[in-house]
Image: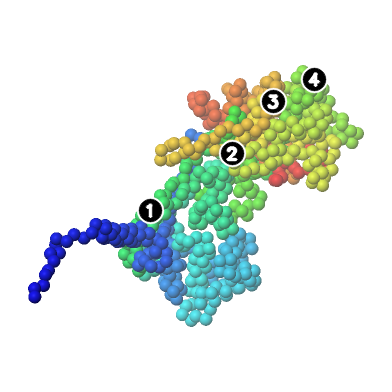
């Protein structure tokens, strides 16, 4: 029997079965490809769950802080670059931490390098809390942060002089160890304490050696395998290009402290970043701060092989900031301020009479463009170097006599003396209590009350009077008698309201912070538990008892010259991209208020200020001065010291572009303040007429000018002009 066979090659499968097979194969391909894509591009999620056999490390790419320049492009603050030697405590081999740290210290010793050790315990036996701990805020902060990070009670760590050291001995397994000497234990503890305090505020390695030299960096690089956890970090440091220039206004930078960590984290900062702490560095942090980049490194789990490196976030340098400051004018002001103060102190010391300026020791200068509130000079003396601030801080902080860290230009408050008479005169004309032409006879002694009869300064110093005075002459001669009468007619409320409208007793708005000043009146006295004496209005009218900052006084004179328009004081000019020069933001002039001073009033009082420098109380300084300027002198007596002296001035006379205020603590004669201002005027005009000016000289005359000072008639309860808010 023959079996019949079928030719299978001639049989065609049904179309539905073929379609189904194609679909199954396509689906399999999709799943396979999807799996590959998932493995290739979604590895991060798998790594996080521990499934991958590779390790991904995210590190920061440090960037640089923006530069600070003056209004003409002169660089005031920039950056220098260097290498740091750092140690990552997380990479120290478990159980071998003490050995590695000690060997690293011995390596540093061999090569003459001193590692960072912030432990506030003596480095030699007996190992006790540093003697200056209670006075050193940095050391207190280290212990506070360590206690918080490690879970200790801070009070227990400092309960006894040895409590901190004993706790650390136990913490680091050294209390009963016989492997190390006591000296070696102290070194190990110092480094490990430093590492732990650093770990509280940063997840980066702790810098043990800053600005290491090239040779040391090369040697340590060759020893990486000997010292696990050691790294070389490239870094930048803030440099102030013109040492000691504008230190108070530029301010300082520093690390983020633990107590500020939450604030800066909320702004997106890494806790290892350097931030502005004071002055322009802090005020313009939003522009100056660079944005660190992020680098993703993928290695095998053992870290031996690098599989890939990519920058996931590009580092972005900070913007440069141009200030309104004129560096040349700032330098002129600072040099003149220091020289005149020292000259007065020297000449005063030669005079056997007490309080002849031998105690002159400090002062401030402000220069402002009255047309927009731009600050051209902000100088305070004594000053200091920002480049050596860390090394000098202890000495600077302990100088309580001269207080060099105080920015007197914005934070010091002083009696304005007779410079306030411009405000009194303008108020008297505004309220109609006098006219431009009214003549008042100076009798020398002003009768206010049977028990209170203050004198005009010329009556006390020369036994004569100014005779008949109108408002222009009264300013020219600084006639106290005339302004006593104006104060009586106005009353303290009207006078203070008008002065406040000119910017006195209120903040100017400058970005770096300031004192608000004090307009003394019944409300102020009552708020401070004092009694207002009606006779105080006479003293207030001539600028006694009120307390203002040099910046405020400059703003007030600028406002007057502007016809009452008061502009916000500012240091910010613009922020720009360093690489391209493109401006990213510039300052818009801001009008704060308008007192609407009549043009006639401005012109008449300006003319009076012109006469002050031509024929009045400042004429000895400006005799023969080629270019027309205006000004006003002032003197304020202080308790237990030589007089404070003030000068305000402006130039050019017709259309003022700069207003200057100079205040010298215990400066003795207003001539000294005027001399500083004159040198600044010289700097201004020298730019316009360079062939007309030589080197300015201090007047050789050591006798005080005939000045308009009047001893305040009070019971000592009023704050005097050298007080600080």
In this rendering, the label closer to the viewer, 2 or 3: 3
Query: Which of the 4 image quarters holds residue 540?
Result: top right
Q: How far separated are the C-alphas under marks 4 and 2?
A: 39 Å
Residue 596 is labelled as 3
The tag on residue 265 is none
CA separation, marks 2 and 1? 43 Å
Cβ atoms at labels 1 and 4 below 8 Å apart = no
Say which residue label 4 marks: 439
In-front residue for pair 689/212: 212
Ranked by sequence position, the earlier of labels 2 and 1 is 1
Q: Position of residue 285 (x, y in %)?
A: 53, 46
For marks 1 and 3 on the same chain, the one whose residue lies earlier in the sequence:
1
Q: Earlier in the sequence, mark 1 or mark 4?
A: 1
Mark 4 or mark 3, which is nearer the start of the sequence? 4
Question: Across the whole image, how many numbered discs are drawn on residues?
Answer: 4
Viewer-proximal residue among 18 and 587 = 18
The residue that mark 2 highlights is 378
Does residue 176 sit above or below 279 in this rendering? below
**Secondary structure beneath label 1:** strand
Q: Give the crowd class for mark 4: few <14, some 14-19, many >=20 residues within 10 Å.
A: some
In which quadrant is the N terminus drawn?
bottom left
Residue 608 can be seen, yes or no: no
Q: Which residue is mark 1?
A: 311
The x, y position of residue 670, in whole percent, is: 68, 34
Seen from this angle, which residue lies furthest top?
Answer: 437
For the point 85% across and 39% down, the residue is 533
Residue contact at pointers 3 and 4, CB within 8 angstroms? no
Asked whether 172 or 639 is in front, the reply is 172
* Precedes in sequence: disc 4 or disc 2: 2
Residues under numbered marks 4 and 2 in contact, where contact means CB atoms less than 8 Å apart: no
Q: Is 102 displayed left or right of 571 in the figure?
A: left
């Amino acid at each position: 029997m023959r079996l019949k066979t079928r030719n299978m090659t001639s049989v065609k499968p049904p179309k539905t079965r073929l379609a189904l097979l194609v679909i199954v194969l396509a689906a399999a391909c999709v799943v396979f490809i999807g799996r590959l894509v998932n493995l290739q591009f979604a590895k991060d999620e798998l790594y996080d769950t521990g499934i991958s056999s590779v390790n991904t490390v995210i590190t920061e790419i440090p960037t640089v802080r923006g530069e600070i320049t003056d209004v003409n492009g002169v660089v005031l603050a920039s950056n220098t670059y260097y290498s740091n030697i750092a140690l990552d405590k997380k990479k120290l081999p478990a159980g071998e931490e003490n050995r590695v740290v000690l060997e690293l210290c011995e390596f540093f010793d061999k090569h003459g390098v001193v590692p960072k050790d912030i432990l506030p315990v003596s480095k030699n036996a007996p190992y006790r809390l540093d003697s200056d701990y209670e006075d050193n805020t940095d050391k207190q902060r280290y212990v506070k942060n360590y206690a918080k990070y490690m879970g200790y009670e801070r009070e227990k760590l400092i309960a006894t002089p040895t409590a901190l050291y004993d706790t650390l001995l136990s913490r680091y397994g050294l209390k009963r160890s016989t492997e190390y000497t006591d000296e070696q234990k102290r070194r190990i503890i110092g480094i490990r304490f430093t590492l732990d305090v650093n770990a509280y505020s940063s997840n980066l390695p702790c810098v043990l050696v800053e600005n290491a030299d090239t040779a040391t960096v090369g040697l340590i690089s060759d020893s990486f395998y000997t010292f696990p956890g050691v790294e070389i970090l490239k870094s930048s440091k803030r440099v102030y290009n013109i040492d000691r220039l504008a230190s108070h206004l530029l301010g300082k930078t520093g690390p983020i402290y633990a107590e500020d960590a939450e604030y800066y984290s909320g702004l997106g900062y890494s806790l290892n970043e350097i931030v502005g702490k004071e002055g322009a560095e802090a005020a313009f942090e939003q522009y100056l701060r660079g944005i660190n980049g992020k680098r993703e490194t993928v290695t095998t789990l053992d870290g031996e092989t690098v599989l890939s490196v990519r920058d996931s976030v590009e580092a972005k340098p900070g913007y440069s900031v141009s200030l309104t400051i004129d560096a040349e004018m700032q330098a002129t002001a600072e040099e003149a301020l220091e020289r005149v103060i020292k000259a007065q102190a020297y000449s005063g010391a030669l005079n056997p009479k007490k309080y002849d300026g031998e105690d002159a020791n400090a002062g401030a200068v402000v220069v402002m463009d009255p047309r927009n509130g731009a600050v051209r000079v902000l100088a305070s003396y004594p000053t200091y170097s920002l480049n050596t601030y860390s090394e000098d801080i202890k000495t600077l902080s302990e100088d309580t006599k001269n207080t060099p860290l105080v920015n007197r230009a914005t934070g010091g408050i002083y009696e304005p003396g007779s410079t306030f008479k411009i405000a009194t005169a303008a108020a008297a004309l505004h309220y109609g209590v006098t006219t431009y032409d009214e003549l008042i006879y100076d009798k020398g002694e002003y009768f206010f009350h049977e028990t209170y009869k203050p004198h005009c300064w010329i009556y006390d110093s020369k036994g004569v009077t100014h005779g008949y005075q109108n408002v222009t002459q009264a300013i020219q001669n600084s006639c106290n008698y005339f302004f006593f009468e104006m104060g009586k007619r106005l009353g303290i409320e009207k006078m203070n309201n008008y002065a406040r409208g000119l910017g006195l007793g209120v903040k100017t708005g400058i970005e770096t912070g300031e004192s608000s000043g004090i307009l003394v009146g019944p409300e102020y006295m009552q708020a401070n538990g004092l009694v207002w004496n009606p006779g105080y209005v006479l003293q207030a009218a001539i600028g006694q008892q009120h307390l203002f900052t040099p910046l405020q006084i400059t703003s007030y004179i600028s406002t007057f010259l502007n016809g009452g328009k008061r502009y916000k004081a500012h240091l910010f000019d613009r922020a720009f991209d360093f690489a391209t020069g493109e401006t990213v933001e510039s300052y818009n002039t801001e009008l704060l208020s308008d007192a609407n001073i009549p043009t006639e009033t401005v012109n008449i009082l300006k003319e009076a200020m012109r006469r002050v420098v031509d024929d009045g109380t400042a004429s000895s300084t400006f005799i023969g001065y080629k270019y027309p300027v205006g000004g006003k002198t002032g003197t304020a007596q202080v308790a237990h010291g030589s007089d404070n002296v003030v000068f305000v001035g402006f130039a050019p006379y017709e259309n003022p572009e700069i207003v200057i205020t100079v205040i010298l603590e215990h400066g003795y004669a207003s001539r000294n303040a005027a001399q500083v201002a004159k040198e600044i005027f010289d700097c201004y005009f020298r730019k316009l007429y360079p062939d007309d000016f030589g080197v300015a000289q201090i007047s050789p005359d050591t006798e005080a000018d005939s000045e308009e000072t009047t001893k305040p008639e009070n019971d000592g309860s009023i704050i005097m002009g050298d007080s600080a808010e």
